[in-house]
Structures are given as C-alpha cells and as structure tokens.
Image (tube, rainbow, N blue to C red):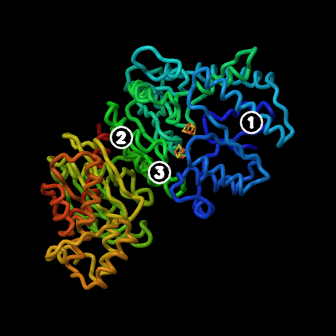
Amino acid sequence: MLGYICKYAPIEVFESMGVEMKRIDPQVSNFTQADMKMHPNICSFAKGVLEDVMAGNYEGVILTTCCDSIRRLYDVLKQELPDRFIYILDTPRITKDAGITLYEARIRKMIAAYKAFSGKIFEEEKLADILRRKQKEQSISLGESGCDAEREPRQEGAETELQKTASGKADGEKTQTCAAGQTSEAGTGCSAVRTVRRKNIGLIGARANESIVRILQEKNANLAFDLTCTGLKRKYLLEPDQVLTGYTRGLLSQFPCMRMEAASQRDELIERYAGSVDGVIYHTVQFCDNYSYEYAWLKKRLNRPMLALETDYTKQSYGQILTRIEAFLESFGQQPEETEKGRTEAGKEKTGKMYVMGIDSGSTSTNAVIMDRDRKIVSSAVVRTGAKSGESAQRILEEVLSEAGLKREDISWIVSTGYGRVSIPFADENVTEISCHGRGAHYFNPAVRTILDIGGQDSKAIRLNEKGEVADFVMNDKCAAGTGRFLEMIARSLEVDVDELGPIALQSKEDIEITSMCSVFAESEVISLIANNREKTDIANGICRAVANKSYSLLKRVGLEKEFMMTGGVAKNAGVVRAVEEKLGAKLYICPEPEIVGAAGAALYALDKLERSSD
Ligand code: SF4
Ligand code: SF4
C-alpha cells in the first residue's frame, strides 16, 4: 500500500499497476517523532503524516512539491525509511499545455523509479480501463438523485471548465423520511416525506481532515462543495491515443490550489461557488505556509457567513472543532441537538406549572438557572466544577432546585451547554456555549452587540445582530493565555487568592509591561519581577493589562461594535474589567452574576423547545 496526500497525486497510475492507494489523513495523539526530527515551524499536517507513516505499514509515500513543510517531510522520511518508496513529484505551477507536458514527463520518471523499486510495469491500456470504470462510476453517482435534491451548486452565469470539476452538490432541500402528510418546509415535498431545509455549507482552504466532513454529516448539514486539497473528484479525461497525456490534463484541470499559478483566479471562482451556500468554512492548518492569508481576504470579499477553523491534526482538537462547527450551524438557526433522554421525553405530556433549566458545565464552574414560562429567573447557582463534570452537575441540580423550592419532576426541559455539555446525564438537549452566551447576553441587555467571555480555560468574542443572533464569533481555546487559568497561575506566583488579584491591581501606581502572553513564560517573568522587588500591585495590574490586550485582539476580530458586555468568572475581576475598558475606550456592561449568562441562554433554548412542542 502506498500513501498519498495531494489531489494532484497520480493515484490511478499506481492502481493500474495493482497498488492499493490510501490518502493519509493523520489523527495523532502526540508529535513525538516529529518533535525530534522536524523544525517546530513545520505545519501540523506534515508532522502528523510523519507520525502516521512511521507507525504504519506503508510500502511508500507519494508526496508533491507543495510547500517547504512537505519538502522537509520528504527529507526526513527518505532518511528514516531508506528501504521504502518515498517519492516527491514536482507538480508544475502552470496548468496549461506546457505544464501538462512537464507533469506527464515527471510522472513517467516516477513510474520508472517505482518499476526499479518494485519490478511492477505500467501499461497505458490498464490505466485507460481504470479511467473508463471511474468515468462510469462518476456519471452514475452524479446521475443519482432523490426527489430532485441532488444537483450542482447553484451558480450565477455559465460554469467554467474548472467549476465543472467540482464534486459539490447544493442539496439544501434534501428530503428526510418522516411522518406522512407533513407539510414540506421548502414547498417542494415528495409524498410521504417531509422536506427538511438542511444548511448548505461550502468547505475551502487547506486540506480538511475527515472529522470536519463527518461532523457536518452528523449535524445534518449538507457539504455542498469541498474545494480543499483533497476535496474534489478528479476529472477522468480519456484520450485513447495519449492516455497518460489526457489523464495528466484531467489532474491539472482541478480547482486550483494556492500553489498554482491559476490561484490568482481563486477568489473569483470561490465567490461564485459561495453564492450557492448558506455559509463557508475556511480551514487552515497550524503553521501552514500556503493558506494562512487567504481567509482574511475572502472574509471581506464573500457575502456569506464564514467560519475560520484551524486544525492541528491531533485527536484532542476534535472537541474544539465540534464546538465551532456546531455554533456556526446554530447561528443559521439550525435546531439544537436532543440527547437520547430528550428524545424519549419529548413526546410526554407536561403538566402543572412550567419551569425549565439551563446548565452551563465549564472547566472551572458549573452554573445553573431555573426559569419560568414568563422568562423570569426563579433561581440560579454556581458551584466549582470538580474532577468529574457529571458529579458537579448533580450537585448543582440539587442546589438550584432547593433554592427554587421545586422538585426534579417540576422541570419540563433541561438544556446543557459549556465544554462538558455532552456529559450531563439529565439534560434533554445541548447547545454550544457560543449560542447560549449570545442568547443570555441579549436577555440581560438587548443593546449588547459584542460580548467578551473569559472562562476558566478558553475565551471567546461574540458579535450579535440587533435580534440578538450570533453574527460572528472567535474562540481561543488552544492555550491558557488570557483565560481564568492564566490568572490563577499568576495569582499563585504572587501568593494571593485569585479573587484578590483585581482589587490589588486597582491600587497600582506604576505601569509594568508583561511582554509574554505564553502562560509559562509570563509566570517566569512574574517570578523575576518579584525577585526584583517590584510591587505586587503593579505586577497584578500588568497581568490584567496583558489579559486585556489579548482580549482586545479577539474582540477586534469580530468587529468592535458597541455596546460591550463581559461574561464569565473573570468579569468579576475589577482589574481586568478596568484594563479592557481602557483598551476599548468604552464601558463594559456586566450583569450582577456574570457566570450565569450561558446558563440563562440555555434556559431560554429550553423554553423555545417547549413553545415549539406546544405549537
Ligand atoms: S496545496 Fe496544492 S500541492 Fe499542496 S497538497 Fe494541497 S493540492 Fe496538493
Ligand atoms: S497544510 Fe499548508 S503547509 Fe501543510 S502541507 Fe498543506 S499547504 Fe503545506
């Protein structure tokens, strides 16, 4: 088996020689080998491929001269695995005739090298057979349609050759089996099925790992097009007299990646594709050379909601990707997800007075709100999240019920949110913390447009529209910088309680600049400031300003639209609040209990559910 990584890799050539080809899509737990053998600035994908190939049983790997990361990967693999077929194909940047001639010659050279390695022989007729078969399979899959749902993305104007190579289908009106006789939401229904308006999402940017596509499917969104490194179905051109030439022409006629000369037309082509979808996910890879800059440009140009998603190819990043995609889909009004328990409870008739509950399971605190049908908060509670989020959820359930003088059976619907939202055993539904904070903020102050939420281990900036819906968001959940955890670490070094940090900072007389935002380096900086007899008050204030600087750059990414609100436990830190207000040049709205904003938002989602089910 040979591994490959790029859509320009001539995999059918190898298949015609009887070789099994596998696209490498690494999901690693650590970068042990890569950390020893590669420079830290190599992209996470290349590092992941190294781990995967070193651990797997590939006969070899076919790389392309994509970028410096892949060239370094080639050098390391060649050195570490001298007995395997490690080959790098020099892919031309030009895709016109000269490029085709060049690439065909390079493919022939690669075939000769593989023959020398394996003894296997290439025959053009066998490649032609494969192309015929794949052409047929492609036309069957394009021809398959259910209830008129499958078609090419809707484009304005005529399609170019490049656009015709896309595999995407905008099937936002895809049908789903449901009870007979229900009205079609899109108005086109087939009999006995309900037509559900699924959200059409386009995917662009650097290679998208499989989990993104899987999450979209699981969340019932339609992947309308995938224009990443690995997303397109290639065009199988068969020129009987020049099989390899025609095949090469097909390879190079794919949607141009950033490496190609034709990339200068990408924004125009992407704009036309984006016209057919509800939103676009732009995927980048940590330390990617090629795809770091396109997003900012496209965000200004595309008239569509966009989500920037960065992957580091570790298994641990799955939760972060999931939250971002879920929040993105929720921002289009996609219905939240019912839990197993919710599905069984949904049909039961609710009696008596109606109460709902929202529970926000964060890394530092677990917060809950009980609300009545008039959207009035009946009780709320905040407890520390222990080692097990399920146990703290049980504790807070008892506390919030007792404060309200209610029993469990009085609560009609429970929505969970926060990073532990899927681990709350008694929740009926879960919604991301992005949507819940947005909803909660609008509930407490409808004038709020921009929210800063600093939690225990992440921070986020959210922009709301005038209806209180999430218009944009960014999250920092990859490092502790600027989060509650960061403040806790520094408070420990200063030997003060984290709750004292704010009041101490307010007494500062002299400005101290903390230059490092990495929590490890910032901690050493603080220790050396203490050793130099600098005042605790000034150090505390320096730290609050460092958090404010980090928060400001997050807020800037969603736009600095007034009114501003701060939520989460750090909103109780007067030093950070003052520093953020100075940076913004505006006041922050802070509600009396900033930790319960997400839980209040979750309770409002629970009320929606009950209103929907009583319609
Ligand atoms: S950027 Fe281009 S050359 Fe590089 S892997 Fe993606 S498709 Fe291949
Ligand atoms: S993710 Fe970026 S840097 Fe990494 S291989 Fe792909 S194009 Fe190169």
Q: Does 30 sit above or below residue 100?
A: below
Tell me which numbered mark, 2 or 1, is placed earlier along the sequence: 1
Q: Which residue is mark 1?
A: 110
Task: Kindly identify the amino acid type of the residue bearing the numbered disc 3.
Answer: Glu
Marks 2 and 3, how far apart in space?
40 Å
Residue at (29%, 57%) from the top-left corner? Answer: 599
Closest to the observer: 139 or 558? 558
Q: Give the left or right position of residue 344, taking residue 37 as reference.
A: left
Residue at (24%, 82%) from the top-left corner? Answer: 534
Closest to the observer: 63 or 384? 63
Task: Kindly identify the amino acid type of the residue bearing the numbered disc 2.
Answer: Ala
Mark 2 surroundings: few (<14), some (14-19) or many (≥20) residues within 10 A: few
Q: Quadrant of residue 81?
A: bottom right
Q: Which residue is mark 2?
A: 296
Which image quarter holds the N terminus?
A: top right
Return the x and y of residue 124 as percentages of the image width and height.
79, 23
Tell me which numbered mark, 2 or 3, is placed earlier along the sequence: 2
Disc 1 under 8 Å from ligand 1? The reply is no
Secondary-structure class at tag 3 = helix
